[in-house]
Image (cartoon, helix red, strand yellow):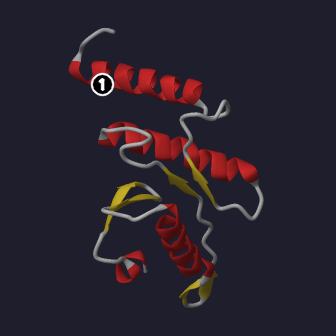
Amino acid sequence: RFKHKCKENWILFRVGGDEFAIIVKNYKDTEELKVMISTLLYITEQPISIKPYLFNINLSIGISKYPSDAKDMNTLLKYADIAMYEAKKCHSSLKYFFFDNDSPGNNLKTFRGIKFIDDRLTAMEYGDNI
């Protein structure tokens, strides 16, 4: 469903499991991103029918922006992941969350923990010690 609604400046890819990422190239402003979010939310509000079953999908969206949040892909993805978990924690009608470097509650401690774990796993894969 997402592929059919993607615009020319969207690049959709699967991160793994049930997580997807969309890169929006050359977006004008945050309002344009909110239109994209509305489109994605609308798509997932429609149940999926695979007879005899009917599936309802929930969607939580985390957004990080280049270059204001980060300048490399890995950090942007991690910040978007942090924002997504903030959206999940809200348990309200808010289904998306923008990462905010300046917010005191931006979970940078969580990010540093993720970074440490990622570094540790990389080291274990290559037999290095950190």
Q: Nearer the viewer, residue 52 or 57?
A: 57
Asked if 116 appears above or below 15 in the picture, the reply is: above
Q: Is residue 82 left or right of residue 7?
A: right
The residue located at (43%, 55%) in the rendering is 17
Q: Secondary structure at mark 1?
A: helix
Asked if 83 appears above or below 58 in the picture, the reply is: above
How would you rate the neighbour count of disc 1 (Cα within 10 Å): few for under 14, some for 14-19, many for 20 or more? some
- Which residue is labeled 1 in the image? 122
Counting labels gives: 1
Please name the amino acid that badge 1 sits on. Thr
Quadrant location of the N terminus? Answer: bottom left
Quadrant location of the C terminus? Answer: top left
The residue located at (41%, 76%) in the rendering is 2
View extreme (front): residue: 28
Query: At which x and y percent is residue 55?
Result: 61, 78
Q: Quadrant of residue 105?
A: top right
Q: Is residue 130 left or right of residue 86?
A: left
The residue located at (35%, 22%) in the rendering is 119
Query: At which x and y percent is residue 35?
Result: 52, 73
The residue located at (48%, 28%) in the rendering is 114
Query: At which x and y percent is residue 82?
Result: 55, 41
Q: Nearer the viewer, residue 46 or 68?
A: 68
Asked if 83 appears above or below 59 in the picture, the reply is: above
Q: Quadrant of residue 14?
A: bottom left
View extreme (right): residue: 92
